[in-house]
Amino acid sequence: MAEITVPRGLDGVIVDETRISLPDRRADRLHYRGYAIEELAAQAGYEEVAYLVTRGELPDAAELEAYRDGLRRARRLPPALASMLELVPKDSHPMDVLRTGCSMLGNLEPETKENGLDAVGARLSACLPSMLFYWHHFHDSGRRIETGSGEPDLAGHILHLLHGRAAADLERRAFEVSLIGYAEHDFNASTFAARVAASTLADAHSAFVAAIGTLRGALHGSANAAVLRFLERFENAEKAEAAVLDMIAQKKRVPGFGQRAYTRSDPRNAINREWARKLAVDAASRRLLEVAERVESVLLRSRGMFANLDYYSALIYRGCGLPVGLFPPMFLLARVCGLVAHIAEQRENNRIIHPSSRYVGPAPRPYVPLAARAAKAAGGAA
């Protein structure tokens, strides 16, 4: 086999085919199963999108209701899992909590012929928010919350678990749109990790754990939290602009900018910007929005850098009252459907993913026995 040289990070390398999503670098567009993200964000609910991503077509009314009902009924935690979450330390990273919870659920309810990938995916989609907020409330206030909220959709369920009450329509829909944007995105790092695991014929929970561990990394799943922490440093847009220009001069990175899949803009960013504007109803939120928009315009004007999905997601989550430490898991809660679709697609036409490397270490050399190494070291010291 001829040796093929590829760039580090596999940037621009096509490793397989997919029917799930198309981030179009030339047109700066994104489609899920052929449907434009703008249309889905404007007209669809998250569960419609999740059904589309996992099953290939949009559901009819009966299919959607059955799908939602199945998710609603799967939200309660097994007692053993709830007990385990109480033992996870309070200062754990939330992604570590979900990684551990997913693994535990895989032991309690393993993937089998009867409990297949679709069932595992539905259970995780319903149960991961329950894991996160059960752990959060237990360690924050000592409360053992009821995780069966009765809400009809994931966005409402998450916000109900967070606040203990139904969310306002504006907050629920803004949150839902952010989830739609995070639902799927080609062969990103965590999706590829899941496909690598799936290619070994590992069970679905193991593939999810691989994805969650990858999302845990600061360069992949934590940007939305970093964005808010960055923007909240500035009292006003003018100070933000001065600081960003200084960062540009020092070649420092600003969180929430750039996306390899696109050239001039991330199509999800404009959608989230509009919802962030709708949520900016008080003075503090409006100030933060002004800061965010100024930073965005400065980077686009000065460096041609565009904001990505994470940028205004940070303002949406703040506007919905989510603690900043819980921002990163929202990526995962939305992406369950995408991961299920990719694991299924990998299994359909599987070949173990096993790339090669170019060796750059020492040339072949003889083994030197320990005594000889010691003598040589002693002689050198003398």
Image (cartoon, rainbow, N blue to C red):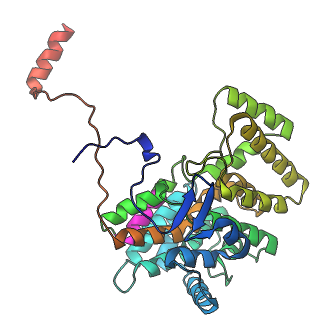
Residue 222, x across and y down, in percent: 59, 51
Residue 371 visible in the shown view: yes
* Residue 164 position (above or below residue 184): below
* Residue 307 position (above or below residue 53): above
Q: Quadrant of residue 252?
A: top right
What residue is drawn where x is 47% and y is 58%? 187
Q: Quadrant of residue 371?
A: top left
Which stretch did the figure color magenta? 203-213
* Residue 313 position (above or below residue 296): below
* Residue 287 position (above or below residue 240): below
Relative placement, left or right, of 49 versus 103 is right
Q: Quadrant of the C terminus?
A: top left
Q: In the image, is residue 174 part of the stretch drawn in magenta? A: no
What residue is drawn where x is 38% and y is 73%? 107
What residue is drawn where x is 69% and y is 66%? 38
Query: What is the residue that sits farthest to the bottom in this orientation?
Result: 62
Residue 8, x across and y down, in percent: 42, 40
Residue 341, x across and y down, in percent: 47, 71
Relative placement, left or right, of 374 versus 82 is left
Residue 37, x across and y down, in percent: 65, 66
What residue is drawn where x is 53% and y is 58%? 95
